[in-house]
Amino acid sequence: MNSPADPPSGPDQRRPEYQNEGIRTLLAMFDHGDPDERLRLGQILQGLQQSAFGVFLFVAILPSFIPIPGIGGAVSGPLVILIGAQMLCGMRRPWLPAFIANRGPRRGTMHRFLARIDGPLRRLDRMLKPRRSWFLVPLPAHAFTGLLLILTGVLLSLPIPFTNYLFGFQLLLFSLALLERDGTLMLVNWIGAIAAVLFFSFSSGQLVQYLTELFQKWF
């Protein structure tokens, strides 16, 4: 089933050149319009090129900042896993099933969230820049980022107390690295995600148990 986020035919997608679709694009996208308008994910991602995964991830983690236990992770976790799985498979642009492409946040919700983090985002906009593309563009790096997103998404989905904001912030940094094509920030994200996965895997055991059950179910 195709969605508006399917990649257009055209030049080779394997090693895309950076286009200016960073934080400023994200801020402008939700800046004006009816606050009650429902922004469909398929429409949000349509027309974006290299930043599509970054924008998708940014929108996907929004529920993780809802201060209601169990709600945020149950919504954001599977979306993050979907993003990670597609990157792990080498896809350069996200594919959305129709039931996800036709859903999305209200413009007012995104605007309020962005207003809360507007200052840090704009400061980061001055710091981040396209660099060290070998942590982003080559297929092994792209796939490794996807693997870490899957594992972090699983952790976000699990009922581990007081971790929604922690994983949400970590995934926010992943989205900014993808948006700005900043390989230095992506390397920092890799280290942080590996540390989080190892810590919570051994401390709670839930991640190992979940992945074991998932493996047994599939194979």
Image: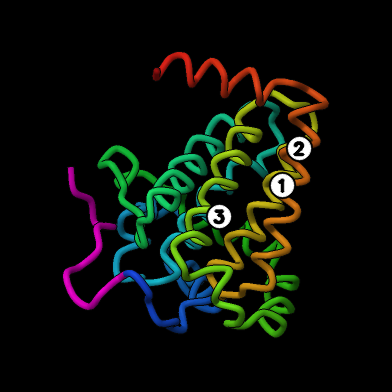
Distance, label 3 to label 2, CA atoms, is 16 Å
Q: In this view, does 14 lie to the left or right of 129?
A: left
Q: What x and y, as percent, mark residue 128? A: 67, 79
Residue topped by disc 1: 194
Quadrant of the image occupied by residue 112: bottom right
Distance, label 2 to label 1, CA atoms, is 6 Å
Secondary structure mainly formed by the magenta segment: loop
Residue topped by disc 3: 145
Kind of residue sitting beneath label 1? Ile
Mark 3 surroundings: few (<14), some (14-19) or many (≥20) residues within 10 A: many
Q: Earlier in the sequence, mark 3 or mark 2?
A: 3
Q: Is residue 21 left or right of residue 16?
A: right
* Magenta stretch, residue numbers: 1-13
In-front residue for pair 123/205: 205
Residue topped by disc 2: 198
Q: Dot 2: what SS?
A: helix
Distance, label 1 to label 3, CA atoms, is 11 Å
Q: Earlier in the sequence, mark 1 or mark 3?
A: 3
Q: Are marks 1 and 3 in contact (CB under 8 Å)?
A: no
